[in-house]
Image (cartoon, rainbow, N blue to C red):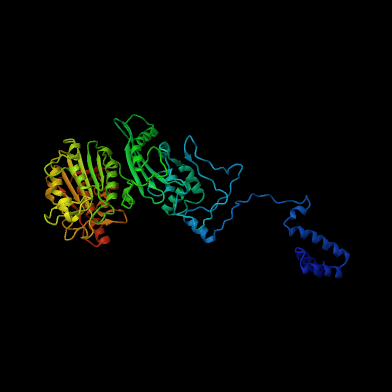
Amino acid sequence: MHPNMLWVAVNSGLNLAYPTTKNTKLAYICTKQFYSNRMRSYYLLLFWLSLPASFGCVGSSLPSSLPTTTKRTPPNTDIDTRSQEEINRELLEGRKEKEPQPNKTTENTTKTPSNTTGEVRVREPQNNPTPTNNPNRNENNITQGNSNLNMLVLPYHQEDICHAFDELSQKQREGIDVVSQGFRDMGFQTGSFTSIMRKMKSSGGCDTHNPTRMLNTALRTAQCAYYAVIETDLDHVQTGSYLALNLTIYDSNTHNVITQQTTDSDRKFTDDTRELIKEAFEKMKPALARELNLAGKPNNTTKVEPNNRQGKIRVNLISDVDKGLPRAQYQNPDAIAVVIGNANYEKTKSVDYALNDAYAMKQYLITSFGFKEANIFYLEDARKGDFELMFGVKGNAKGKLFNNVKAGKSDVVIFYAGHGATGLNDKNAYFVPVDCDAQYLEIGGYPTDVFYQNLAQVPAKSFTVWLDACFSGTELVQNVSPIVVKGKGVAGLREGILMASSTDDQYSTWYPEQGHGLFTYFLLKGIQQARADKNGDNRLTFNELYQYMSDKTEGVPYWARKLNNIEQVPLIKGNTIEKVLIEY
């Protein structure tokens, strides 16, 4: 074809795509003047081929014999308004990108909780979702809508939720199933851990090194208000098999601990693990209902704190010593414990981590020392009347502790975390109840000399006293020293051991990053995983524990200087410091 002819044909086709412009008319005149009737035929053919394209209907004007492309279903009909930077950021945070819209005839059905099982199914993507760049959307909020009845049960794992799923054992599956059914019986709806994790892994939710992001991704998928982490330990003894169930419930948005429960099933000759788990869960149901403030079934006013006291300190376990507790080799059914955490003082400054210390110690006593939960007197924010009711008053030692001890059989453990101080006039040491005015310790405080005198009258087999008396400077009262624990007090006890957080006039400090008093943190850390068992004989003595805690390069003295620039050396007193505390 002549070059001029080609140019006119192309120019005419392009211009005739917009037939109302002046260029169209000009092209037509040029064609009519300079070319023959035959070229005019080519021009008309090009015109008719170009005209349908301008209206998006080429397919309808083509001959039916021409091959057509395969019709494809669009991967997603939603308009993604995110920038590439936002998409990359969300992928790094563990949130998945938009998923293909399922075939409506086969997959796009939103399953609702079954009336028979109460299980909440994973919801498929809906049309027109809220764009992720919506300024009104709170990405930190795990739950959406009325989801305060939802619970997700997870297995415990030392690393992260994805490793937990990859290494999920049959026993763990059974535990999740039975506990989930137990929560459904209490009125909750439960998510499917397996379904959620499969969906999460397929969308890249595990492709991150941040365990918290992995957990948040699973919780956001489940849209649950709470999640429960379970541990089970099956043991066989001569009287039968029994299972220890440890259950910790967290708030999904804050990850604060709501409650932690540990219960053993009855001993029976059976290999049915599900039966033992169910029995253990049934035992802890009343405590769960009480801690979650449930009356019959959950409702819209379900509380998530273990105590309903607005604006006050609550239990919030965040430390590495709060999980992975060693299991007791032997049960101690006659042992008695008194655990006191004083945090919310009415007339002086609070003790931020006293409740964490007390609650964690209670769990160690149950899980690691084999105490019965019913034999543990657990007191939060004890008042002076609580001290007197528990330990007696001067001249009368027959308080609750005295009356519950079995003579010659009961090991007694006493743990106290809170304020301690010396009186302004008598210079004696006092426990400070939460209702005490620190300027009047001699009247409102509970004297330690009465405490030891009354303990000496309790006919127990042995005594262990742990004191983490928290101070920060002299702000408690003017011109006073911290609690002074004198050796003569514990020396009068039969088989008595005292371990205190500091000696003489030193202050007891906190470890904010771990959410515990410094003394309590290293006490629990030494017990956990036998870190303090220096000779490796799987028998931890009091002296070994003390040596671990008082180590000048790794223990309390070093960290007190590093964190708070003060001197703090733990104290140990007693006549049986080589006694075995725990066996592994």
Q: Nearer the viewer, residue 183 or 14?
A: 183
Residue 582 at x, y percent in the picture: 24, 43
Q: Residue at x 88, y 64 (%)?
A: 37
Instruction: Report the residue that reaches farthest toward the right.
Output: 37
> Can you say whether 370 is above or below 28 in the image?
above
Q: Residue at x 36, y 30 (%)?
A: 270
Residue 33 at x, y percent in the picture: 86, 70
User: Image quadrant of residue 109?
Assistant: top right
Q: Is the N terminus in the top left, top right, bottom left or bottom right quadrant? A: bottom right
* Number of numbered discs overlaid on the protein picture: 0
Left or right: 426 in relation to 266:
left
Residue 350 at x, y percent in the picture: 26, 55
Instruction: Report the residue that reaches farthest toward the top.
Output: 269
Left or right: 30 in relation to 459:
right
| Whether residue 330 can be seen here | no
Q: Which residue is drawn at 32% across and 56% down?
A: 513
Q: Which of 119 and 243 is in front in this view?
A: 119
Q: Nearer the viewer, residue 223 or 568?
A: 223
Residue 156 at x, y percent in the picture: 38, 45
| Whether residue 449 can be seen here | yes
Left or right: 252 in relation to 13:
left
Q: Is the C terminus in the top left, top right, bottom left or bottom right quadrant? A: top left
